[in-house]
Amino acid sequence: MSADDIAFATPYTNHYFSSLSPAMLRFVPLLHRQHAGPSVLAANGGDRFTYAEFGCGQALSLLIMAAANPNATFYGVDYSPAHIARARAMADRAGLANVVLLERAFEDLRPDELPPLDFATMHGIWSWVPNSTRDALIGLLDRHLKPGGTLYVSYNTLTTWTGLLPVQKLLYDYAEQATGSPEDRARKALDFLESLIAINAGHFKNAKALSEWLKQTKSGDIRYVLHEYFVRHWEPTPHSEVARRMERAKLSYVGTTDLVDTIDRFTMTPETAKALGEVPAGSIRETVSDLLRSNSFRRDIYVRGPVPMTPAEWRQRTRRQRFAMIRLRERCNLSVKFPIGTVELNEQAFRPILDRLAAGPATLAEVAAEAGDTQDSNLVRRVVTMVAAGYVYPASAVDADPGPSQRLNRVIADEIAAGHAHDVLASPVLGSGVRMAASRIVDFAAGKAPPEEGSQERKDHESERATMARLRVGFAPG
């Protein structure tokens, strides 16, 4: 985004994105049997690495991860002074000393402002900036990302957004000449589009999909709508083009953080999976996969010089990988909705995994001992299924100092009480965030008495409290 974009004056929504967690950025290359990222723990038991988020916005994700990984150093870069001011205020209130926030255009970053990086992330940037900015980002990655370093990049795919290209250009042009605040101008443009659809002619004849998209867009948060569609350089991109650009920084595609897409039977029919399997591996297969899945958004992992693991290395590393349950145990139903439909998971295979993780975080080796399965590849697939279902998540190798997480969680609770919309707390076990309803966060932070004995609310309260204890989620004194 640039200063002449309609959306620039309106701060973006302040959301948390779990795909940016260091544990996930490590797990994806491991899943694909590739060495990547740092592997050495600091002497006092916490990970020590460098991490940068380009286009950090108000930086809630970055602050959550910084609090949950106090031995690491996090850099956030964003063009908006309002975003950086907001992020600095939260970091200062939480006393986070391991966060560096820079108000910069990517093109203006000096070489001495960033160190060599273990992780770099770009969420919601690539499809919304001009080619010159993408070139600047490639230059930053080439300069700062270490050999073996990991990149996360998300973007809109060309495969499912092609039909909206002329509509988005129309919306932007209409809003640019309209009057009022950015929000008013966006609403006027959306109303104008609605009037065109009602004519039911030409491009808009029988436009049921477009009508549904417009209905959902008009009901959404206007700040999100502005930043998503009312930018001058809105450009969905095929995987092959992103991969070619990344090659200039010696980056190779490894996999996706959308782990459900790694299990074909959960996303496509056997016939479709067979057809995809016959496509040569590489960018062509990724493009075909996007088309067959109608995939509109990619969350890709690249590594600067991935090195394949030997079978023995992979077994050793996977057995050390730790996981944690992030959902109430009683809500981990074995009837799971995946893109292909509802899938009935085998109780004998999955229940021991869930039962072990309900007792607390565990390595794959510890899960294997409980599940009685000696085939590591089978067990990995089952755990990945639990991650894809939203029940389990990769955790840090060891628990971090909980103090910074507790301080940030107190700030988050205070902000919710003041009217801000947050639904996440920092966990020193995950090294990232755990979702929770805003009302529950406020109640727990205030030490509110639990609901009436025997009520469903009381049971939910106790289960939620047990989850917080399992993930060491707490609050500093108010």
Image: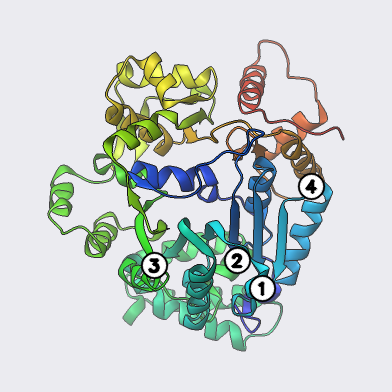
Indicate which disc, 2 or 1, sits on the residue closer to the N terminus: 2
* In this rendering, position of residue 387 left or right of residue 341: right
Mark in the foreground, 2 or 4: 2
Split into 4 quadrants, where in the image is the N terminus? bottom right
Q: Which residue is pictured at 30% across the width and 39% down the height? A: 341
Q: Identify the element where label 1 is drawn.
A: loop
Amino acid type assigned to the residue bearing label 3 in the image: Lys
Answer above or below: position of 288 versus 465.
below
- Spatial CA distance of label 1 from label 4 is 24 Å
The label nearer to you, 3 versus 4, is 3
Determine which residue is flagged by label 1.
79
Instruction: Verify CB contact (< 8 Å) between mark 1 and mark 4.
Output: no
Side of 445 where 160 appears, left or right: left
Pointer 2 with pointer 1, Cβ within 8 A: yes
Q: Position of residue 112 (x, y in %)?
A: 66, 71
- Given contact means CB atoms under 8 Å apart, are the residues at marks 3 and 1 in contact? no
Give the number of the disc on residue 169: none
Q: Which residue is mark 3?
A: 250
Q: Residue furthest right?
A: 478
At label 1, which amino acid type do we have?
Tyr
Residue found at x 39% / y 67% = 250
Give the amino acid at mark 4. Answer: Glu
State which tag comes first along the sequence, 2 or 3.
Answer: 2
Q: Nearer the viewer, mark 3 or mark 1?
A: 3
Give the Cα separation between the discs numbered 3 and 1: 26 Å
Q: Residue furthest front?
A: 43
- Which sits earlier in the primary sequence, circle 2 or circle 4? 2
